[in-house]
Image (spheres, rainbow, N blue to C red):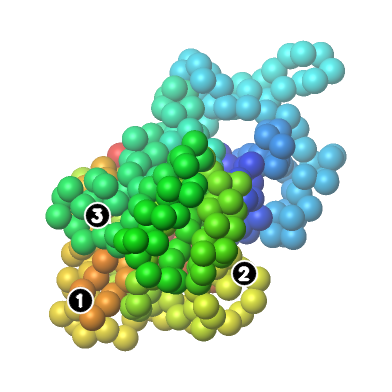
Amino acid sequence: MKKTVAILFGGESSEHEVSCVSAANVAENLDTELYDAILVGITKDGKWWIFRGSTDDLRNHVWQDKRALLSPAVISPCKAHHGLLALDGASGSFEIIRVDVVFPVLHGKNGEDGTMQGLLELAGLPYVGCDTYSSAVSMDKAATKTVCADAGIPVVPFTAAYDTCDVEALIDSVEKKYSYPMFVKPANAGSSVGITKAKSNEELRNGIALAFEHDKKLLIEPNTVGREIEVAVCGNRRPFASVCGEIRPNSDFYDYETKYVNDKSECLAPAPLDEGVAEEIRTLAVKVYTALGCSGLSRVDFFLTENGAFLNEINTIPGFTPISMYPKMMACIGIEYKDLITKLLQLAEGVE
């Protein structure tokens, strides 16, 4: 008997559009002999809908305008329901739609940070990816680095601050510790949203203001000169790593526009690395994954410098767009897209 998968997409984060494209790819690569899909979209203003239209509408970002193909629905936190409540606005009644497993293809806040995972835990629904705790810790770049540094993993140095801080004192402190350029990042944001490469005091000041527009907490880091290396990790109790991949931004840094808007960047999988170096980074990626209590999947990003590899960040729901590195790196070890989606759903249900 086929199982029902609820694919969650969209969301209120700045990565809404990326999520829609990722979800379209996941839906199109679902093994239809094993699973039936229900597409559940969340608009930018937080409305939930079952969408019965084409994945092209997700990719073209017009799904929310197809009113005839939308039905209001929510995930019920009641374990007895074990799924969705499809709502009838006119009568006030609802229909229970049973769901076997959930694939939250939600990037960024309210999707990747433990909030959605908490709801799914309350609902008693198996879901793809990390649990509530590891999602929250991994989303917070400062918390990630604190935990990993404690586990003996080399991390890029950082200074963290909240929006209640004395900005002048913060600027004075980091200018004494680091030289320009510096990177200013929201602590909880993905896809390089809200990041500034500050080359002067004025740019640092503006970067701090921008970061606080996206999150109440930020990080300031010294510029790390090195190659950008990524590793896909998969599994629950026995996690394994893909080949290493390499991002070559061919721009000042790998920001949102470079990732998704223009075509300047190069994504190499496998990365051209000495075999010994590649194996060290792959081992380090699994160590990061384990230290943070991850499960299902994550992409771990490093800077490879002349002094070795340093953890940059981890993404617990990496992109599944046509240019995304996670599926590309997994394909390099023989796990093609369709098989990868099946593997992740099986891991969600506890099958290693």
Q: Residue at x 46, y 18 (%)?
A: 79
**Image coordinates for residue 211, horizontal then vertical, percent:** 54, 51
- Decide if residue 291 is on the left or right side of residue 165: left
Q: How far apart are the two marked residues, 3 and 2, measured between alpha carbons? A: 28 Å
Query: Where is mark 2, residue-wise?
Result: 257
Dot 3 crowding, Cα within 10 Å, few <14, some 14–19, many 20+: many
Q: Mark 2 vs mark 1: which is more N-terminal? A: 2
Task: Please tell me whether mark 1 sits on a helix, a strand or a loop.
Answer: loop
Query: Where is mark 1, residue-wise?
Result: 307
Query: Does the rendering let one see residue 72?
Result: yes
Query: Does the rendering let one see residue 37?
Result: no
Task: Please tell me whether mark 2 sits on a helix, a strand or a loop.
Answer: helix
Vertical placement of 131 versus 324: above or below?
A: above
Quarter assignment of residue 245: bottom left
Query: Where is mark 3, residue-wise?
Result: 288
**Image coordinates for residue 22, horizontal then vertical, percent:** 57, 57
Q: Residue at x 73, y 29 (%)?
A: 72
The answer to which of 299 and 136 lies nearer the viewer is 136
Q: How far apart are the two marked residues, 3 and 1, measured between alpha carbons? A: 19 Å
Foreground mark, 3 or 2, reads 2
- Decide if residue 318 is on the left or right side of residue 138: right
Identity, as a three-letter code, of the amino acid under mark 1: Asn
Identity, as a three-letter code, of the amino acid under mark 3: Val
Vertical placement of 236 versus 225: above or below?
A: above
Q: Residue at x 51, y 40 (%)?
A: 163
Dot 2 crowding, Cα within 10 Å, few <14, some 14–19, many 20+: some
Quarter assignment of residue 300: bottom left
Identity, as a three-letter code, of the amino acid under mark 2: Glu
**Image coordinates for residue 94, horizontal then vertical, percent:** 70, 18
- Decide if residue 322 is on the left or right side of residue 135: right
Q: Residue at x 70, y 54 (%)?
A: 58
Vertical placement of 139 versus 75: above or below?
A: below
